């Protein structure tokens, strides 16, 4: 548990906060050299989800009821958490706006957690004075020619063609792999570009290489990611994408403070598979390397609902590769995932939307010498990937959580057993763009037929001022293996600050 507590404090929201602001002020529209975006969140939470290890109380990610020490209890607990993610872009006028420096930092904590110390995700106890600034981005952005940009440094890496720094949230979560496979920060170089005018775009692309882990500098024991994506616009409001992502892992499962890869404790903690290649429970685990490729096809019609009242998006992903186990035969990887979502804005207001989403991923069959499930970046990083469009708060990851981000199914592999899930919601703007009521929920089971849970939730939200949202949320899940059915009630205040 000491090992798990060490990296549970590294919780990092997968969704890039800068994407939330683009609908209000596009990145290219601000004339100032220095632009600022702040994403502020404060939450008061009442829940029966508890931690059994005080070292991770209040700061924990991963699977509810898993190795992160979380469970449910008949006695509820309450806490308040807060986050500020601050994003800065400096574009010197001397260079005609063609070159920019991006930087992003984060401070988050639970009220009353710790003071007079050093460490992320804490710092709100009496006296404060905590050293807790976390680096999220630090990169240089160069416009080679209009419409074509190269980004070098620490940046957000998604699993689609869109540049996270200049895209809307829907562009990231409803294109490509929908952040279900990759959605976190990494250092590297990426090129983004488009062909055709913005109003008549023909195609866009992304190509990049990232170093996920640099072990010994003189040895080839690193983890590297190579990505290539192309998206075409064959007709009005229609997008078709082709994607390929290749991960080369030669770290032997030892990268990071809790290991990495499909045999790691990190993967198990976050609801991914933990493939056990030991001869016996008391023997040392062998070194494990991997070569993995994800090939994806996606298509959508008006997925952001900005060109009409109806939108759909679908993606099919094939996950193939090989796992190299020291002293043992190689393990082939052959898995897949399908996701389809449809939305309909049936009344006035952006929140008056009915939504249905179906997801299925393949599962592993024990003893056949292959791994038949999918693998995501959750096997290599804390919140390395996130399923974000489900609308649930406990069954699947709550995308608005600050430090306490646990769920029954945190990874689309469902621990390697495969996932079959359906989620739906109906929202109505009682006062268009001012007050909203949304009822939602979801159902999940493994591909073997084992039930994982069913959630029902209700969200009441209002906007007291522009870009500020106050929400009251309640959610509960039944049909789990937990001691008590998990539930939560929370009040959340979210404010997007532009400057």
Image (cartoon, rainbow, N blue to C red):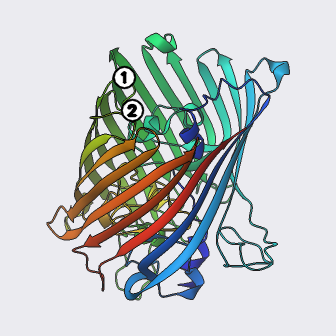
- Where residue 322 appears, as percent x and y from the top left, is 35, 53
Q: Secondary structure at mark 2?
A: loop
Seen as rendered, the residue at the extreme front is 431
Q: Secondary structure at mark 1?
A: loop
Q: Is residue 86 left or right of residue 67?
A: right
- Where residue 229 appears, as percent x and y from the top left, is 44, 30
Q: In the rendered view, would you say 192 is above or below 390?
A: above
- Where residue 178 appears, as percent x and y from the top left, is 39, 43
Instruction: Return the mark for residue 304.
Output: 2
Q: How far apart, in angstroms, are the residues tagged by discs 1 and 2?
A: 8 Å
Residue in view at x 67 percent, y 36 percent: 152
**Which class describes the residues within 10 Å of circle 1: few (<14), some (14-19), or many (20+)?**
few
Instruction: Return the mark for residue 464.
Output: none
Q: In the rendered view, would you say 175 is above or below 119?
A: above
Q: Is 152 in front, or is 101?
A: 101
Residue in view at x 49 percent, y 42 percent: 158
Q: Quadrant of the C terminus?
A: top right
Q: Is residue 147 left or right of residue 307?
A: right
Q: Is residue 179 left or right of residue 138?
A: left
Quickly name the residue at label 1: 307
Q: Hey, which quadrant is residue 363 in on the image? A: bottom left
Q: In the rendered view, would you say 63 is above or below 434?
A: below
Q: Is 153 in front, or is 493?
A: 493
Verify CB contact (< 8 Å) between mark 1 and mark 2: yes
Residue in view at x 37 percent, y 43 percent: 429
Determine if residue 279 is in view.
Answer: yes
């Amino acid at each position: 548990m000491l090992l798990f507590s060490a990296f549970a404090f590294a919780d990092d929201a997968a969704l890039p906060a800068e994407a939330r602001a683009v609908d209000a002020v596009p990145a290219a529209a601000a004339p100032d050299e220095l632009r600022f975006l702040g994403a502020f969140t404060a939450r008061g939470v009442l829940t029966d989800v508890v931690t059994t290890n005080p070292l991770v109380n209040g700061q924990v990610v991963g699977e509810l009821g898993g190795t992160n020490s979380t469970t449910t209890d008949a006695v509820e607990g309450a806490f308040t958490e807060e986050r500020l993610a601050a994003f800065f872009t400096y574009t010197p006028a001397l260079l005609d706006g063609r070159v920019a420096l991006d930087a992003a930092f984060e401070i988050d904590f639970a009220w009353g957690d710790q003071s007079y110390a050093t460490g992320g995700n804490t710092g709100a106890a009496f006296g404060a004075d905590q050293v807790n600034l976390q680096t999220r981005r630090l990169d240089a952005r160069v416009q080679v020619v209009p419409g074509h940009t190269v980004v070098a440094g620490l940046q957000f890496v998604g699993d689609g063609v869109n540049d996270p720094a200049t895209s809307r949230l829907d562009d990231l979560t409803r294109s490509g792999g929908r952040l279900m496979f990759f959605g976190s920060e990494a250092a590297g170089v990426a090129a983004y570009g488009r062909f055709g005018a913005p109003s008549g775009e023909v195609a866009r692309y992304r190509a990049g290489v990232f170093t996920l882990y640099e072990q010994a500098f003189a040895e080839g024991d690193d983890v590297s990611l190579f990505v290539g994506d192309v998206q075409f616009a064959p007709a009005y409001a229609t997008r078709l994408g082709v994607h390929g992502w290749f991960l080369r892992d030669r770290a032997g499962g030892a990268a990071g403070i809790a290991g990495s890869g499909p045999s790691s404790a990190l993967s198990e903690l976050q609801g991914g598979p933990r493939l056990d290649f030991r001869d016996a429970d008391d023997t040392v685990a062998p070194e494990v390397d991997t070569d993995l490729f994800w090939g994806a096809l996606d298509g959508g019609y008006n997925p952001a609902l900005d060109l009409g009242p109806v939108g759909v998006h679908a993606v099919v992903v094939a996950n193939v590769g090989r796992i190299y186990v020291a002293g043992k035969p190689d393990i082939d990887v052959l898995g897949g995932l399908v996701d389809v979502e449809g939305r309909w804005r049936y009344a006035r207001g952006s929140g008056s939307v009915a939504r249905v989403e179906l997801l299925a991923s393949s599962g592993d069959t024990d003893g056949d010498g292959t791994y038949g499930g999918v693998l995501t970046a959750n096997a290599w990083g804390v919140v390395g990937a996130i399923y974000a469009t489900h609308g649930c708060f406990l069954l699947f990851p709550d995308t608005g959580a600050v430090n306490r981000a646990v769920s029954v199914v945190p990874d689309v592999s469902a621990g390697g057993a495969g996932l079959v899930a359906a989620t739906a919601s109906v929202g109505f703007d009682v006062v268009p763009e001012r007050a909203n009521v949304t009822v939602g929920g979801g159902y999940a089971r493994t591909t073997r037929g084992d039930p994982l849970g069913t959630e029902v939730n209700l969200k009441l939200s209002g906007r007291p001022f522009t870009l500020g949202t106050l929400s009251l949320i309640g959610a509960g899940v039944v049909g789990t293996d937990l001691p008590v059915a998990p539930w939560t009630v929370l009040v959340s205040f979210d404010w997007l600050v532009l400057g």
